[in-house]
Amino acid sequence: MIEIASRAPPPVLAIDGPGGAGKGTISRLAAERLNWHYLDSGALYRILALAGKLKGIALSDESALSDIASKLDIRFGTGSDERIWLESSEITDQIRTEQAGAAASAVAALPAVRAALLERQRAFRRMPGLVADGRDMGTVVFTDAIVKVFLTASAQERADRRYKQLIAKGIDVKLCDLLADIQTRDDRDSNRAIAPLRPAADAVLIDTSSMSIDEVLQKVLGLVDLQTS
């Protein structure tokens, strides 16, 4: 009998880290450079929290939220198109607020919700490859990723970045409030019982506090080159 070698799964670059460390920016740019697919796993939790809110479901109702998670009708834009749709409505701006981020962190701590979204996230893995952005991409969702990166930055630096982004959009916020929100979310994400925020044992840690976007991107792409060349 002739044995047919099994085809290797599409490669994955897993980029994890706390909010404001630069995951989204670096992941999108890396996916564009590599011509790979892109998964914004955090958006799934933000969308779920919004969907629950629209249906009048409490963020603590694990059973109802996990049921919604298994049936979400979501569509993401491709390439440079960052728009997101829930059913027929574009919700891009609605899920990018600080309140949406806090709500996402709350529902992400629910085990049944994480289980419901796990296979949905893994379904994004297609040829020629995937860049997965999140908090447990390297530790839970794609444990066999060819490269695992954990981006971090000080809470103050992340608050400063977010403050500048929101002010540029004409949104009036207080830096001290943003810092407090970031610290609260870090604590909740790092101490939840299921899939806590932490680097994988084989992840490369990159502190982006004093690095430019291009410097971080080149370092990440260099890691991929080492594994694919």
Image (tube, grey):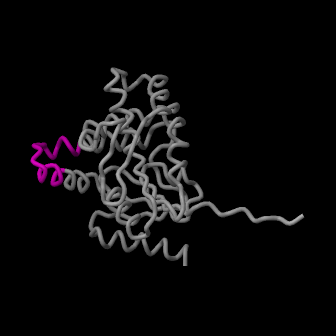
13 falls in the magenta region: no
- Residue 122 in the image: state x and y as whole percent: 54, 49
170 falls in the magenta region: yes
Specify the quadrant that holds the C terminus: bottom right
Q: Residue furthest bottom?
A: 229
- Residue 45 in the image: state x and y as whole percent: 40, 39
Q: Residue at image x 55%, y 43%? A: 119
Residue 55 in the image: above or below residue 178: above
Residue 165 in the image: above or below residue 71: below
Specify the quadrant that holds the N terminus: bottom right
Residue 34 in the image: above or below residue 59: below
Q: Residue at image x 49%, y 60%? A: 130
- Kindly indicate the quadrant of the structure image that contains residue 177: top left
Is 88 on the left or on the right of 171, as rendered? right
Magenta span of residues: 163-180
Q: Residue furthest front?
A: 88
- Residue 63 in the image: state x and y as whole percent: 49, 23
Total labels: the figure holds 0
Majority secondary structure of magenta residues: helix
- Kindly indicate the quadrant of the structure image that contains residue 73: top left
Q: Residue at image x 43%, y 49%? A: 135
Q: Nearer the viewer, residue 123 or 78?
A: 78
Is 5 on the left or on the right of 122, as rendered? right
